[in-house]
Image (tube, helix red, strand yellow):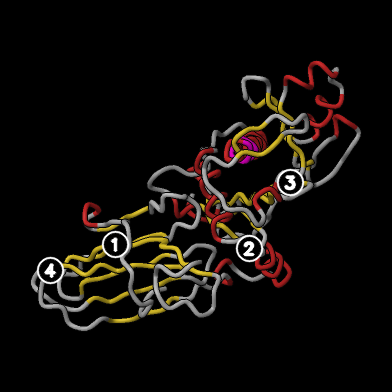
C-alpha cells in the first residue's frame, strides 16, 4: 500500500474531522472528506469536539451523538456521566504530564490523556469503517496508513508530545511504526493545502556539530531548555534538563552531534565516527521525571539523571 494511503485528522477546539486518500501514488490524488450529523438534521464536514463517558469512564459517543445524548439526559443521569466539550485548549499554557486531569461539564474530573486518546480512537475507527464501506468491505488496519494529526502552532513542545502519546494510546500507531504518525502544525498544513505542494513541503532543519577527539571511555551529551534568554549555569532558575545520552567512545575517535529541531519534535543523535555506533534521544518536554524515549545501538548506555552545576556551553 505504501505511504500513498493517508488519513489526516483535524482535531479542533470546537469541531473535528478527518480526510483520507487511498489513491495509488501513480494516480491523481483524490482526498475524501466525510459528512457528519445527517441523522440529526445537519450536514457538515466536521463534528463537534465533544465526548461522553459513562460513570465507569467508558467512552459512549463522540461528536453530534455525544452532544445530543447528553442534552437529552435527566439531571440525575448527567451527574453520573462525564461530558467534555471544547476541551482542547486545556493543553494551552499548562505544564503537562500524563496525570493531568480536566473537568467535565458536571465538575467531575478525568485524566486528560484518556479524554484525548478516546476522542482520537473514535475518529480513527470511524475513518477505517468509512474507508471499508467505500472499498467493497475490504478490511484496513491502522498500520496500512500514514496518519497526520494537526496541532496549533502556539502549543509548546509538551502539548505536541502529549498529542503523540494520545495517538499512541488510541491505537493509531504502535511500537515500531512511530514514523507513520506525522504531527503537523496547522498553519503549515493550511499552507501546503493552499499551495498544493507535495508532502516534502514540510521542512525539517538539521544542525550538526563535531566534538574534539576523545581517546577512550564515554562522552555524555546533555540537553537543557529555558525560556530565559541569558542563562549561564544548568542549575540557574528556569533551566531544566530535557534529555541526555551516553556515546561509547571505546577505542577513541570523534563524536558527531546532529540536532533535528525544524519539525514538531526535537531529536538529537550522537555518532561515534570511528565505530559508527549511535545514540538517539527524543527530547521530552512533558513528563515530570524527565524520562526520555531512547533508541540506539546500545540502549543500556543511554541515561537521564541528576545534572551537576556547570556552564551551559554546548547545551541545547
> Is residue 213 in sight in this rendering?
yes
> Is residue 135 in sight in this rendering?
no
In x, y percent, where is residue 174? 44, 42
> Is residue 290 left or right of 257 when viewed as pictured?
right
| Circle on res. 245 | 1
N-terminal label among 2 and 3: 3
Which residue position holds label 4?
217
N-terminal label among 3 and 1: 3
How far apart are the alpha carbons under marks 4 and 3?
A: 52 Å
Range of residues picked out in magenta: 115-120
> Is residue 130 left or right of 226 when viewed as pictured?
right
How far apart are the alpha carbons under marks 1 and 4?
A: 14 Å
N-terminal label among 1 and 4: 4
Circle 1 Cα neighbour tier, 10 Å, few/some/many (<14 / 14–19 / ≥20): many
Taking the spot 61% from the left edge, 49% from the top edge, the residue there is 7
Image quarter (top left, top right, bottom left or bottom right) of the C terminus: bottom left
Mark 2 near mark 3, Cβ–Cβ under 8 Å? Answer: no
Which residue position holds label 2?
185
> Is residue 292 left or right of 65 when viewed as pictured?
left
N-terminal label among 4 and 3: 3
Q: Is residue 311 above or below residue 269?
A: below
Where disc 3 sits, the SS reads strand
Mark 1 near mark 4, Cβ–Cβ under 8 Å? Answer: no
Amino acid at each position: 500500500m505504501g505511504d500513498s494511503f493517508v488519513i489526516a485528522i483535524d482535531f479542533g477546539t470546537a469541531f473535528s474531522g478527518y480526510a483520507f486518500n487511498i489513491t495509488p501514488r501513480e494516480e491523481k490524488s483524490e482526498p475524501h472528506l466525510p459528512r457528519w450529523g445527517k441523522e440529526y438534521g445537519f450536514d457538515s464536514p466536521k463534528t463537534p469536539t465533544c465526548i461522553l463517558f459513562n460513570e465507569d469512564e467508558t467512552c459512549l459517543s463522540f461528536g453530534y451523538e455525544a452532544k445530543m445524548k447528553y442534552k437529552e439526559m435527566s439531571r440525575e443521569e448527567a451527574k453520573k456521566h462525564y461530558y467534555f466539550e471544547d476541551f482542547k485548549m486545556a493543553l494551552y499554557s499548562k505544564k503537562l504530564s500524563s496525570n493531568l486531569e480536566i473537568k467535565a461539564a458536571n465538575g467531575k474530573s478525568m485524566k486528560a490523556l484518556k479524554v484525548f486518546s478516546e476522542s482520537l480512537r473514535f475518529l480513527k475507527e470511524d475513518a477505517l469503517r468509512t474507508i471499508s464501506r467505500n472499498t467493497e468491505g475490504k478490511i484496513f488496519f491502522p498500520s496500512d496508513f500514514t496518519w497526520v494529526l494537526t496541532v496549533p502552532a502556539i502549543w509548546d513542545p509538551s502539548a505536541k508530545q502529549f498529542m503523540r502519546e494520545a495517538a499512541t494510546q488510541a491505537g493509531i500507531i504502535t511500537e515500531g511504526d512511530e514514523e507513520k504518525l506525522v504531527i503537523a502544525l496547522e498553519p503549515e498544513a493550511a499552507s501546503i493545502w493552499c499551495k498544493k505542494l507535495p508532502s516534502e513541503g514540510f521542512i525539517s532543519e538539521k544542525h550538526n556539530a563535531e566534538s574534539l577527539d576523545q581517546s577512550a571511555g564515554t562522552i555524555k551529551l546533555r540537553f537543557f531548555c529555558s525560556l530565559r534568554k541569558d542563562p549561564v549555569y544548568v542549575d540557574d532558575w528556569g533551566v531544566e534538563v530535557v534529555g541526555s545520552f551516553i556515546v561509547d567512545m571505546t577505542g577513541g575517535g570523534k563524536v558527531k552531534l546532529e540536532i533535528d529541531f525544524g519539525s514538531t519534535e526535537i531529536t538529537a543523535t550522537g555518532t561515534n565516527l570511528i565505530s559508527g555506533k549511535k545514540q538517539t534521544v527524543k527530547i521530552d518536554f512533558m513528563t515530570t521525571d524527565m524520562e526520555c524515549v531512547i533508541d540506539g545501538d546500545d540502549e543500556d548506555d543511554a541515561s537521564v539523571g541528576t545534572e551537576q552545576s556547570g556552564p551551559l556551553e554546548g547545551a541545547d
